[in-house]
Structure formats: C-alpha cells, structure tokens
C-alpha cells in the first residue's frame, strides 16, 4: 500500500509517520501551507498535488483534520481521502460540497458530532483518538527534568479568554444578563450540552447580529457556538485553577500567562512530542477540562495523559466513562467542588493514586495509535488480511 500523507505540523503528525513505518506502509509526506483550512480554491496546490498523486500511483491520501482542496483532488482522481479529525466542533461552513464526496472517509472522535454529521449525509465514521504509547514509554526523564516538571496538579492547555469581551459589544444590558444566565447554567451541566436550546429565538438573533461576527466567512451560528463554548470553558478552567492553587502547587502550561491567577505556577508552553509527556508523568494529578462543545468524546489530551502513565482527573465525558473505569483507570468529576475534593483525596492517598495511574496506562493500550490506524484502514480498504503492505 502507498499513501500520501499531508503534512501541516498538526498534532499526531510525527507519530502517524512513526506508526506507518512500523506497519510497513509505504508513504510520502507532502508539505504545504494553506492560508486557511476553509480554503476551497488553490489552483497551484491542486496542480502540483494532483500531479504527485498520479505519478506516484498512490492508493490513498491521509491527513489530520479535513482539507477541502485535498478532498477535491482525490475526488477527481477517484482516490480515497482519509481525514482523521481531532478538532471539535467541526465547522462545516462552506466546506459542505467538499465534505460530501464519496471518496472521503472522515473519522470523528466525538460520537455526538459524528451522529450529527452522519444525519446530514456526510461520509463520516466514529473512532476514538489514539496515542503512540510505544514511543511514549521509551521517553527518558532526567533527574533535572523530574524537578522541573514536578507539581501537585498540572494543566496543559489554552485558557480561551481572548475574544469574548469584544464579541459582547453591542448587547443591551438585558441581553447581557440573559447571556450570562445561559453561560453560568451550562457551566454547571456535566454530560450534556444544552447551549443550543438555551439561546434559541430572539437571543440567538441578537447574538448573530453582533458586529463581531460580520467578518466571519463561514457559518455565523457555528462560530458563535464555538466562541461561547470557549468562554464557558475558560470560566471552568480559571475557577478550578484558582481554587486549587489556594491549597496546592498548581502548574499551568499555556501560551498566555494569567495575572489573575497569582498562585498558579505559569510554565509557558511545552512541545507536544516529548516534553508534554514528561509533564504528565511527573505531575501527581493531571487535569483534563474539556472544551464544552466536545459533547461526548475523549479529547486527545486525556488520551495522552493516560498513555504517559499520568494520573487523569477529568470532567465527566460520556465516552470516557464508557471506555475507562472511573476510580480505577481515571477519576471523573461532575462539578468544581467535586474536583476540589477529589484532588484533596488523591494527594493524600499516594498509593491509590499511583495504582489508578498504572491502571489507566494499561487501559489506554486498547487505543494505541497503531491499533486506531489499523481500524481506519480496515474501514476504508477492508480487513488487514486483504491489504497488501
């Protein structure tokens, strides 16, 4: 089998290459920088990419996330296009035509998102994300690094506060009050995403008419939904980090320092190939605070924590508790006070904490990147016995 692997420096890219080599699958890496993931027209790319596909006699194209121009090239040449999505929500916008090509096989990690897009007629499949546990297990942490990455509680991720204040410009005081009520209600709901139903009607129309959304090129409703989800997530992340830092040594690895969190140890960003796994292994508790619009799926961050042998404390996610045993493989919280109590408990019960981290590492072996890649290829090309290597 010969695959074309599109390279854009996305998450999992280097590990995908690692796994394909291990599986003895021949592939070529094609690197190109689009101005936007929503670009539908790029005549130069279409020309050079189509030529490379024809000359190399490739049997498929694989990319992390979905690229419409690649889908178009594959459709014209009748070559399967495999897109493995790790972002959620998946903004359709003006990509609808490209998404509908029958040469596409689009894999989504969030079951709710998958069901929605399947109902809309797109060629989608549901598959949990995976991580390269074999490589991660081989990462060596020096004595100096052990000291550097130690913390009672660590959180790796964005805080998402950037755009919300600007978005609200133009709202009346009454509308601001209603929106605040919606955000605070969704903040306290775990296991269900009710934002859409709570902003229907005149409030939704007021929000969609805000000047901030005038520059949006694709679906205003989808962009608004994502922005509000980020604001809710910011509030949960901020509140939890603030309260935990009052009692424990809390480290934040992010692209922006938060001055309003003076007791949180800001440690900047970490690379996603090696350093991040050292953080997970050396932190006594690792937080996964899922972006609110990921309705049911297991985010890549949670999978990485488990694969690295870290102790995972996550907000409730339906697919997490379906695939991993709460209080055995990981620990799940259902409110901010619940999370605080569980941090206190597991920091005071070291052996129990270590046992759960060990169990989580073993359980994540069912979702290694190689196993997930084998599942993808089986869906697209048939059983592994029927595929040449």
Image (cartoon, rainbow, N blue to C red):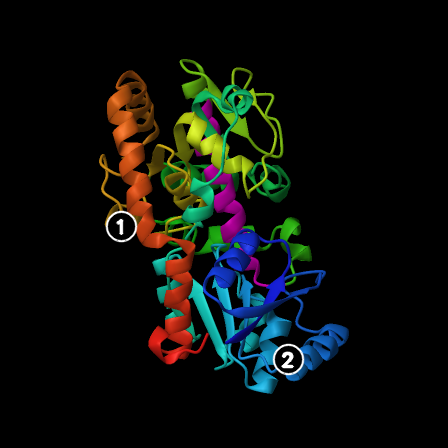
In the image, 380: left or right of 72? Answer: left
Instruction: Calculate the distance from the C-alpha at mark 1 to the C-alpha at mark 2.
Output: 40 Å
SS category of the residue bearing label 2: helix
Q: Position of residue 215 (x, y in %)?
A: 69, 56
Which image quadrant for residue 285? top left
SS category of the residue bearing label 1: helix
In the image, 188: left or right of 255? Answer: left
The residue where tag 1 is placed is: 323
1 vs 2, front mark: 2
Q: At x 60% / y 34%, what residue is drawn?
A: 269
Q: At x 58% / y 43%, what residue is drawn?
A: 171
Q: At x 73% / y 76%, what residue is drawn?
A: 48
Residue lying at the far top in this picture: please name it: 247
Would residue 232 be counted in the magenta stretch? yes
Question: Is any part of residue 387 visible from this angle?
Answer: yes
Q: Along the polypeptide, which appears first: circle 1 or circle 2?
A: 2
Residue numbers of the magenta segment:
218-241
State yes or no: discs 1 and 2 in contact (Cβ < 8 Å). Answer: no
In the image, 243: left or right of 21? Answer: left
Q: Nearer the viewer, residue 246 or 61?
A: 61
Mark 2: few/some/many CA within 10 Å (<14, 14-19, 20+): some
Q: Nearer the viewer, residue 232 or 275?
A: 275
Would residue 159 be counted in the magenta stretch? no
Mark number displayed over residue 11: none
The residue where tag 2 is placed is: 56
């Amino acid at each position: 089998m010969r695959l074309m692997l599109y390279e854009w420096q996305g998450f999992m890219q280097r590990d995908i290459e690692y796994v394909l080599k291990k599986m003895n699958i021949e592939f070529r890496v094609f690197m190109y920088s689009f101005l936007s993931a929503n670009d539908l027209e790029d005549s130069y790319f279409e020309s050079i990419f189509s030529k490379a596909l024809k000359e190399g006699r490739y049997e498929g194209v694989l990319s992390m996330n979905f690229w419409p121009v690649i889908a178009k090239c594959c459709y014209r040449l009748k070559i399967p296009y495999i897109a493995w999505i790790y972002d959620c929500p998946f903004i359709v916008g003006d990509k609808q035509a490209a998404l509908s090509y029958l040469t596409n096989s689009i894999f989504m990690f969030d079951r709710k998102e998958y069901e929605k897009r399947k109902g809309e007629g797109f060629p989608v499949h549901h598959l949990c994300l995976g991580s390269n546990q074999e490589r991660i297990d081989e990462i060596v942490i020096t004595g100096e690094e052990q000291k550097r990455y130690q913390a009672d509680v660590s959180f790796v991720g964005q805080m998402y506060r950037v755009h919300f204040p600007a978005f609200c410009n133009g709202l009346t005081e009454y509308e601001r009050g209603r929106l605040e009520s919606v955000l605070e209600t969704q903040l306290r709901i775990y296991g269900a995403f009710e934002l859409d139903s709570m902003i229907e009607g005149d409030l939704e129309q007021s929000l969609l008419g805000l000047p901030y959304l005038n520059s949006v090129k694709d679906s205003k409703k989808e962009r608004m939904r994502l922005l509000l989800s980020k604001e809710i997530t910011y509030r949960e992340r901020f509140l939890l980090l603030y309260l935990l830092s009052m009692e424990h040594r809390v480290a934040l690895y992010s692209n922006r320092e938060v001055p309003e969190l003076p007791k949180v140890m800001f440690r900047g960003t970490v690379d996603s190939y090696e350093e991040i796994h050292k953080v997970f292994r050396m932190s006594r508790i690792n937080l996964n605070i899922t972006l609110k619009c990921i309705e049911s799926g297991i985010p890549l961050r949670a999978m990485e924590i488990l694969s690295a042998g870290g102790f995972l404390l996550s907000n409730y996610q339906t697919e997490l508790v379906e695939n991993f045993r709460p209080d055995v493989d990981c620990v799940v919280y259902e409110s901010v006070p619940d999370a605080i109590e569980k941090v206190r408990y597991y920091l005071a019960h070291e052996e129990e904490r270590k046992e759960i981290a060990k169990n989580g590492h073993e359980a994540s072996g069912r979702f290694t990147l190689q196993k997930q890649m084998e599942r993808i290829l089986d869906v697209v090309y048939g059983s592994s016995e029927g595929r040449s290597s």
